[in-house]
Image (spheres, rainbow, N blue to C red):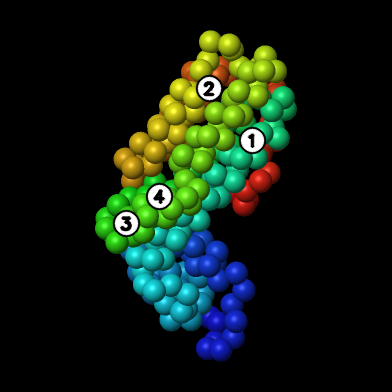
């Protein structure tokens, strides 16, 4: 435990990661200020030192994870022509489901104040699903120019399908429901084709580590 008056490094990320573990392990109903700080090994009042309350904390957690995914998506531009298209897309779309993503999305939906904060931030320009979709569209166009995506594929529609499906799965997946990742992998394959046997891909490097 961090004693009173002693600074805790990387407080926001430490608390965010702890919240993800609590929700993934015990479900959205288990998330409280105390459960987060206990999981993080921090002083009990630390969360309220950095956030106005649990609703603000949940909203900031969701926005932070959206931004992380958007950063990965923007880094796709540097992956054009490398690895496989399917693996590169999976590296972005599947990060939404890491660290209890579905449970966190469900948690935000059950907290109207947190949902409102998220919506207002996105309307104000915070990176979210729209930023991911735009980046995926640009990446698919680049791969199309290289001949690695069929000319028949419409990049805008394919990106909308990927991001829209991810959003749907996030909103309908809860702890205990089937893992949404296989469905996303099947969709990627249906849209852009599979990968060459034995081939690999490097992950986009622009965001935080998964």
Mark closer to the chain start, 2 or 1: 1
Of helix, strand and loop, which one carries label 3? Answer: helix
Q: Position of residue 113 (x, y in %)?
A: 29, 61
Given the current orientation, which residue lies at the most extreme front position?
Answer: 124
Q: Residues within 10 Å of mark 4 (few under 14, many from 20)?
A: few
Alpha carbon distance from label 1 to label 4: 24 Å
Q: Residues within 10 Å of mark 1 (few under 14, many from 20)?
A: many
* Residue, disc 4: 123
- Name the side, left or right, on which 89 lies relative to 178: right
Closer to the camera, 131 or 196? 131
* Residue, disc 3: 116
Figure quadrant of residue 74: top right
Of helix, strand and loop, which one carries label 1? Answer: helix
- Mark number, residue 155: 2
Alpha carbon distance from label 4 to label 2: 24 Å
Closer to the camera, 112 or 94? 112
Q: Closer to us: mark 4 or mark 2?
A: 4
Whether residues under marks 4 and 3 lie with C-beta atoms below 8 angstroms apart, the answer is: no
Of helix, strand and loop, which one carries label 2? Answer: helix
Given the current orientation, which residue lies at the most extreme top position?
Answer: 152
Mark closer to the chain start, 4 or 3: 3
* Residue, disc 1: 76
What residue lies at 55% left-to-right and 64% top-to-bottom?
13
Task: Reply above or below: 132 against 141.
Answer: below
Alpha carbon distance from label 2 to label 1: 14 Å
Closer to the camera, 190 or 67? 67
């Amino acid at each position: 435990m961090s004693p009173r008056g002693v600074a805790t490094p990387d407080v926001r990320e430490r608390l965010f990661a702890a919240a993800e573990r609590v929700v993934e392990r015990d479900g959205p109903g288990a998330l409280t200020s105390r459960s987060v700080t206990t999981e993080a090994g921090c002083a009990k009042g630390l969360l309220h030192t950095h956030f106005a309350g649990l609703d603000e904390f949940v909203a900031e957690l969701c926005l932070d994870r959206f931004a992380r995914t958007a950063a990965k998506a923007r880094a796709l531009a540097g992956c054009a022509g490398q690895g496989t298209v399917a693996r590169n897309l999976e590296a972005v779309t599947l990060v939404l489901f890491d660290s209890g993503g579905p449970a966190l999305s469900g948690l935000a939906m059950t907290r109207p104040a947190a949902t409102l904060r998220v919506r207002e931030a996105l309307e104000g320009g915070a990176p979210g699903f729209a930023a991911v979709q735009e980046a995926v569209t640009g990446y698919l166009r680049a791969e199309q120019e290289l001949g690695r995506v069929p000319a028949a594929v419409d990049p805008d529609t394919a990106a909308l399908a990927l991001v829209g499906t991810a959003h749907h799965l996030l909103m309908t997946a809860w702890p205990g429901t089937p893992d949404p990742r296989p469905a996303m992998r099947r969709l990627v394959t249906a849209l852009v084709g599979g990968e060459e046997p034995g081939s690999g891909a490097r992950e986009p490097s622009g965001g935080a580590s998964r």
